[in-house]
Amino acid sequence: MTLVIGHGGASAVAPANTLRSFDAAADAGADMIEFDVRSRRGELVLAHGARAMLRGGCLALDDALDHLGRPRFAGIGLNVDVKGPGYERRTLVALRSHGLTDRALVSSQCPAVIDRVRELDRGAATAISVGGPIARRARSWSRQSWRTAVVAALRSGRFGDLMLQHRLVDAELMAAVERAGCRVYAWTVDDARLFGRLAALGVAGIVTGDPRGLAGERSLVGIAAAG
């Protein structure tokens, strides 16, 4: 069954990376909640972009984890998107101190972040995230070579799973990742028909800003597959 992953909680319903957004995602039936971690003046905070972080008023990671550790979130996974290197240890310590390590999938578009997380905790669930052309060029991944490089890294165990901008998902890549013994997650999808197409390809989870409609669509895809 394809997991519904709330982007920043439920960013189409409430501001992303806030307690209100997390509550909305839980109310909508999300299976996992994604949020972004950055370091600001030595404090770990939740912010998608650097501009949002600089504006201030960001939720502290410890406050977010305290909230997400409450009973209403029991059984809901956490996708912790670490936006840059240098604070991997503190992120892992925070997850551990709140008893949430086993529910967390740590992802990043920065390979060095995933390398460091796996160095610090070989048991941590991780995923390399691959975005659009600008993001891929920043990692020296060309249009032709990134798939080969990423699949090879998955096969070697360097990365745990793969998170992809949804336009990059196709049947050939899905098969290659499956042969490597790994899973594909797609981001960010708010269209029910696109959700259905990706789920039919076998995507493990799909990030959405609005989990309300897609939780029901997930059930319909499961019924169709069973039939």
Image (cartoon, rainbow, N blue to C red):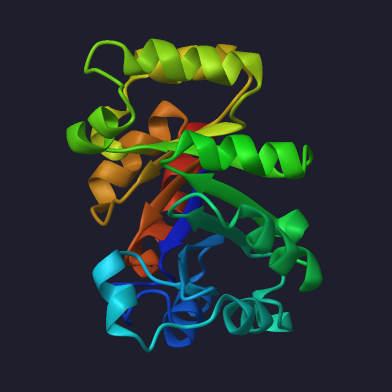
Which of the 4 image quarters holds residue 71?
Answer: bottom right
Residue 83 image point, x, y percent: 43, 54
Q: Is there any visible trace of residue 215 in the rendered image?
A: yes
> Which one is nearer the viewer's eye here, 75 or 199?
75
Going 49% across and 75% down the picture, which residue do you hit? 45
Q: In which quarter of the image is the N terminus?
A: top right
Residue 113 image point, x, y percent: 54, 43
Q: Is there any visible trace of residue 227 in the rendered image?
A: no
**Number of numbered discs visible in the structure rendering:** 0
Going 33% across and 67% down the picture, which residue do you hit? 210
Residue 105 image point, x, y percent: 61, 50
Going 59% across and 49% down the picture, which residue do you hit? 106
Asked if residue 118 is positioned above or below residue 175 in the image, the reply reads: below
Which of the 4 image quarters holds residue 129?
Answer: top left
Residue 192 appears left or right of 91: left
> Which one is nearer the viewer's eye here, 157 or 214?
157
Asked if residue 181 is positioned above or below residue 184 in the image, the reply reads: above
Most extreme residue toward the front is 41
Residue 213 image point, x, y percent: 34, 64
Asked if residue 220 is positioned above or below residue 114 in the image, the reply reads: below
Going 25% across and 43% down the picture, which residue do you hit? 194
Asked if residue 192 is positioned above or below residue 58 in the image, the reply reads: above
